[in-house]
Amino acid sequence: MWIENLLPPLLLLVFVSLAALLLYGLVRYSRTRPQPKIEFRYLLDGMTDGVWFVDTEARTTFVNPQLTRLFQLTEQDMLGKTIFDLMVPEQVEATRQAFARRLEGEKATGITTLTLRNGVTLHLRFNTVPIYDRRKRLTGALGILSDVSENYHMEQQLRQEEEHHRLILENINDIIYVIGPNGIIESLNPAFTRITGWEVEDWLGRPGIDLIYPDDRDKFTQSLQEAIMPTRTIEARLRTVSDQPIHVEIKSHRIIKDGVNLGSTGVARDITTRKTEALQDLQVLLEYERLALLNRFIRHASHDLRTPLSIMNSSAYLVRRKLPTDALVEVQRHLETIEQQVMHLNEQLDNLFAVSKDYMLSRVPFVEHNFHELVTLVVRELAPVFDRKNQSLIFTGSDTDTLIHCNPEEIRLAVRHILINASSYTLPNGKINLELTRNHESVTLKVQDNGIGIEPEDQEHIFEAFYRVDEARSLDTGGMGLGLTITRAIVEAHGAQIKLESVPDQGTTVTLVFPVHQAALQPASTP
């Protein structure tokens, strides 16, 4: 009985004891459970950088709002997911290797490009470290991420601009330089080597004035000192590795900051070609004026000389008509000499007049003409010239299919000059051979003599106006050295070629090559 009365108080005591033990355990557990304090959570949520906690399996255990905003995901989208689940497959393997190094205790800092499966691509500056508990056991990793996409794009743009500037500096044809306030060269681009032949390294640290050609230095220095504006343009000559100066146009700009001279930068452009062309233009202009004066003289002289020559020729004719036959026999030789010399002078006047007309600018329309007929005509005209020296003139070649597009009168004159020249420099009883050939592209006339030939030093000048070979070697005198000049002008005006080959004491060969006119190549149509 007494036991029944004692049992309820004992049960109550046991229950109270158990409750006290449970409460004590909960308090101890709450003190040791690793959950962040409320203040620390507020700190993480307020950070401007993204915070990402993962465990040893790379599963997300915590992200702050800034990271979810960067990734354009929700907290629920990320918690429990591995970092590999969130990124595109192409980046998984490299990320696995990096995460393995974190598990080995390695820290990492840098910039990377991350592309997520939702299509978001970010350029991130990251700082990742492994996480340990109080017992120094590895529990995961922490990543602090900040978006540097804007800076990244700006840096990329700057790098591209720098690369573009580098390419321009390396490939531009002008010299770009920087000279310090003390006049020392600080920078030169590769064009400096291409233009001057000097290596850039040979001139860095040397005075810029030393590059100016010595004769131009005083003028160059004076121009710089007299310049009022910070930017000025100066022409000068630069030294080169070959000691041949080049003309450059220098556009120089002084660099002044807060009143302090920091040096100058500029561009030097090679204008040697422009200078040469300007000089050539001036020479052409002077030559034109000289020729214009010569032409006026020739025209007036030709007119003044032809009148007395005509009188002399008429007088010889009248003497021949008026003298009795017996008296004429005595003066016949003298009359022929007078007539030949008058003809010779008239020919020289014709040559001078031809030069003044400049056959290369002929305005006479070209027509199709048989080249064989023209050559035959000239051979007949000059037969007396060859007969007087008992020279053999042989003309071979087909008289068909030799049509050329030409001014017949000019071609006749060109062939005439070549044959007269061949006779003049061939001994009596010598031989002159003419050969006319044709193929599908050209008609060729070859004039070959066995005369005295032309020395090599004279051959390169033989087509120049008024040039004559050594008078001591000339068999005939009286020419003015215009025949071959006129011939070349005529031939080139017809789009043809003239070639000369000569061996002293063996003879000379002159070759004319005329292109076949296209109309002559087409077969005649049949009815």
Image (cartoon, rainbow, N blue to C red):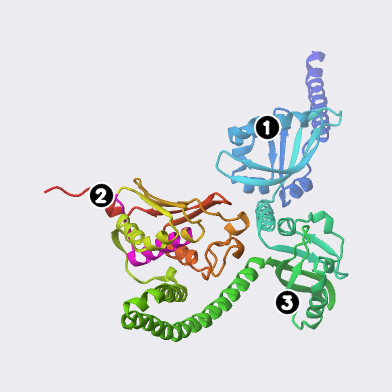
Residue shown at the point (81%, 67%) measured from the top left: 179
Which element carries disc 1, helix, strand or loop?
Answer: helix
Which amino acid type is shown beneath numbered disc 3? Thr
476 and 227: which is toward the camera:
476
- Please name which of the two marks, 3 or 2, marks the residue nearer to the observer: 2
Q: Which mark is residue 517?
A: none
Is the residue under label 1 in contact with that under label 3 (CB below 8 Å)? no
* 230 shown above or below 271: below
110 and 25: which is toward the camera:
110
Q: Which residue is mark 2?
A: 522
* 217 shown above or below 77: below
Question: Looking at the image, is mark 3 or mark 2 earlier in the sequence?
Answer: 3
Q: Which residue is mark 3?
A: 231
Q: In 3D space, how far apart are the residues under numbered discs 1 and 2 (Cα atoms)?
A: 76 Å
Question: Looking at the image, is mark 1 or mark 2 earlier in the sequence?
Answer: 1
Answer few, some or many: residues within 10 Å of disc 2's Cα (few below 14, many 20 plus, some between 14 and 19).
few
